[in-house]
Structures are given as C-alpha cells and as structure tokens.
Amino acid sequence: MADKILVTGGAGYIGSHAVLALLEAGFEVVVLDNLCNSSAESLVRVAGICGRAPVFIEGDIHDARLLDGLFAAHEITAVLHFAGLKAVGESVRKPLEYYENNVVGSVRLCQAMSRAGVFRLVFSSSATVYGEPAEMPLSEDSPTGSPTNPYGRSKLMVEEVLRDLAASDPRWSIAVLRYFNPVGAHHSGQIGEDPRGIPNNLLPYIGQVAIGKLKELAVFGGDYPTQDGTGVRDYIHVVDLADGHLKALQAIACQAGWRAWNLGAGQGYSVLDMIQAFEQASGCVIPYRIIARRPGDIPACWADPARAERELGWKAQRGLADMMADTWRWQSMNPQGYAR
Ligand code: NAD
Ligand code: UD1
C-alpha cells in the first residue's frame, strides 16, 4: 500500500505544488488547511492535472480533536508542514497572531503526531532565519539567530523547538527545509501563487503590472552594494522546491534526528535582472521606478545548495527563463487567481 502523507497548508502556493508532486509519485495525500490564505480550488486543479485527488479536510492545526480524529482515520507515515502565516509586514503589526499560528500551531501539530505515533516531519523554514548575512553564499552552518521581523523569528523558534524535540526522543526524524525565494508555477498554468490584496513579493507584483492590474513596479533601493544597485536574491522554481520535499521524505525515512537543508538554486539575480527576464518571457514592458530601500531588506542573499545535492540528491533544475515563462502562463491564464 502507498504511504499516506499529511500535508498541512496543502491548499496554499507551495503546498499545492507539493501535493501534486506527491500524487504524481504515487503517494496517498491528506490535506489539512483552514483556507485562511488559500482556496480549495487549487486542489480541484491539482486533481485535474494528475487525475487523482487528495483527501481534503478544512480545519486548523491547533485543533487537537480534529488532528486526533484525522490520525485515527488515516494511517499517516509522515507530515509535510506548510501551514503558517507568511506576510512579513503583517507580522510586525500582529506579532501575537504570528507566534500563535506559526509557533503554537506547530507545537500542537507535533503533540498530535506524538500521540498518534507519527514521528516523521518536514518543516517549511526560510532563509530568513539567517538574518543579515555576514558572508555569502549561505550554508546551513552559517549562523542563524537574528531574523529582522516576527515572521522570521517564528520560523527560527519552530526550528529550535523541533531540534529540542528530536534531541529528546530518537524516534523523531525531522527535515528543516530553508527555502530561498520561491517563484514560478506549474507549467500547466493551472496552479500558482494567488496572493490576497496587493502582493508583497517581487514576482507576483511584476505579474500584476504585466496584466495591467497594477500601474508600475516600485524597485526598493538602487544603492545597494550589488552589480546594478538593486537587491539580489536566490530565486527557486516552486516545482523544484516541491521535488525537494519528496527527496527530504526519502531521507527522513532512513535517518533519525534533526537536519536542515537549504533549498535554493545557488545563483543570485538582481531586481533589474528579474524585470528584464520577465519582459523577455512575456513580451510585456514592465514600467518601474527606483525608490527608497524597504526597511528590513538585506542587500543580497543566495544559497550554497551543496548539502542538499550531496545528502538528498536534489538540485534545482529550472532556470530563470522557466521561472518567468511559468509565472507568466499562470498569471495570464488566471488574471483573478483562483477566483477566475
Ligand atoms: P500560503 O499562504 O500560500 O500557504 C500556507 C497555507 O497554510 C495556506 O493555504 C493557509 O490557508 C494555511 N494555513 C495557515 N495557517 C493555518 C492553520 N493554522 N491551520 C491550517 N492551515 C493553515 O504560503 P506558501 O507560500 O505556500 O508558504 C508555505 C510555507 O512555506 C509557509 O510556512 C511559509 O512561511 C513557508 N515559506 C514560504 C516562502 C515563500 O516565499 N512563499 C518562503 C520561505 C518559507
Ligand atoms: C521576503 C521576506 C522574507 C520571506 C520572503 C519569501 C521581507 C523583508 N522579507 O523576502 O522574510 O522569507 O519574502 O516570502 O519582506 N522588491 C522590489 N519591489 C517590490 C517587491 C520586492 O524591489 O515590490 C525587491 C526586494 O527589495 C528584494 C527582491 O525584490 O530585493 C525580492 O523581494 P521579495 O520577493 O519581497 O522577497 P524577499 O525580500 O527576499
């Protein structure tokens, strides 16, 4: 019988791509999502792409009774834990919501897993745990500890909780995946990122300028010590990211303890590189204006992804042209996101 995987936050941007990858690889999938930042339509689309549907349970990771029932009803072998809040600016305004949802919610999930005897967990962390980096590229041994906002601190806290948990009981096997900047969409154009309101992140913003929903892109800072003065990041295609979770599942099936892996491409691109690449892929002109730096932004950040290649056998396969073409296909086919 195929392994059954619980995916928390599986209706969201990255989670829905991971659900698709799991179904395509033959796993059974149960999704738990409270839809606070997503739509169940993403899972309908996933089923349309691969011809198989996950079990979908609308609910919250804090709900102990629901989790106990879920684990009793389904023989879950491992959990991919995507559920969380992720808007940096909002986390500054509402820190308690972020600690409650991301930290307390993760603790509740682990308690329920422990009661159910499920000890394999893959956690969605972020390169933000490295804070303002002293050296580049960032390896997993680079120091963590000074994220610039409550969102980042909530991710680091969960990493530490999970580290203590693994140290307390050898049955736990935990993969902490530190994502760099996820972008792109499935090549079908059926699933992708569907931010509510005005996007905070670069690619969704560029996409909405391209379809005329937003007037122009504000480039945050033109005076960074980078090749063209704009911020440099390591963009990683969301389908590559989803594949990384399958590799992490394989790894934690064979080893116990806590281990962190960077999931990045290992290559930095500036904001102007991104605008140019998007224009090439889409044929659209992206009007932009360089304004002041965004508070809390760092000049540059990219991964050393060697550990993931060595230990997981994972390496990003898709380059900038794929990221842009897939973003544009999703954006132009779904100008209103899942609302159509
Ligand atoms: P997303 O908002 O699209 O997905 C998160 C999902 O979790 C949503 O479907 C939301 O409804 C659900 N959710 C939130 N709180 C919940 C709760 N208490 N109970 C049940 N469901 C809940 O975000 P995403 O971009 O897919 O991110 C997935 C994970 O990866 C998050 O933990 C995020 O912090 C992390 N991450 C994202 C990025 C990024 O740039 N997208 C970068 C690094 C890390
Ligand atoms: C942001 C978060 C980070 C989170 C990551 C993924 C902040 C400070 N950091 O990272 O914690 O893990 O998203 O969700 O919010 N840019 C513009 N104009 C825009 C938007 C972005 O110029 O309208 C620039 C930024 O200054 C940056 C680059 O584009 O140089 C990428 O920005 P973004 O997509 O927001 O990601 P990060 O800031 O890297």
Image (cartoon, rainbow, N blue to C red):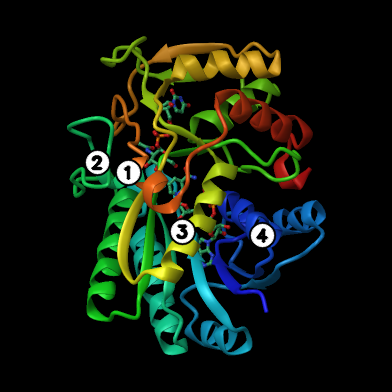
Q: What SS does tag 3 mark?
A: helix
- The amino acid type found where label 1 is placed reads Thr
Q: Are marks 4 and 1 in contact (CB under 8 Å)?
A: no
Which of pointers 1 and 3 indicates the residue nearer the eye? 3
**Label placed on residue 38:** none
Q: Earlier in the sequence, mark 3 or mark 4?
A: 4
User: Which of the two residues, 274 or 65, is positioned nearer the viewer here?
Assistant: 274
Q: Earlier in the sequence, mark 4 or mark 1?
A: 4
**Label placed on residue 248:** 3
> Which residue is the site of mark 1?
128
> Which residue is the site of mark 2?
131
> Which residue is the site of mark 4?
25
Q: Residue at x 27, y 53 (%)?
A: 153
Q: CA distance from mark 2 to mark 1?
A: 5 Å
Which of pointers 2 and 3 indicates the residue nearer the eye? 3
- The amino acid type found where label 4 is placed reads Ala
Query: Is ligand 2 less than 8 Å from the beta carbon at label 1?
Result: yes
In the rendered image, the vertical position of residue 207 relative to residue 140, given as above or below: above
Q: Are marks 2 and 1 in contact (CB under 8 Å)?
A: yes
Can see residue 148? no
Which of pointers 4 and 2 indicates the residue nearer the eye? 4
Mark 1 Cα-neighbour bin, 10 Å: few <14, some 14–19, many ≥20:
many
- The amino acid type found where label 3 is placed reads Ala
Q: What SS does tag 4 mark?
A: loop
User: x, y (%) of residue 36?
Assistant: 57, 59
- The amino acid type found where label 2 is placed reads Gly
Mark 3 Cα-neighbour bin, 10 Å: few <14, some 14–19, many ≥20:
many
User: x, y (%) of residue 159?
Assistant: 30, 61
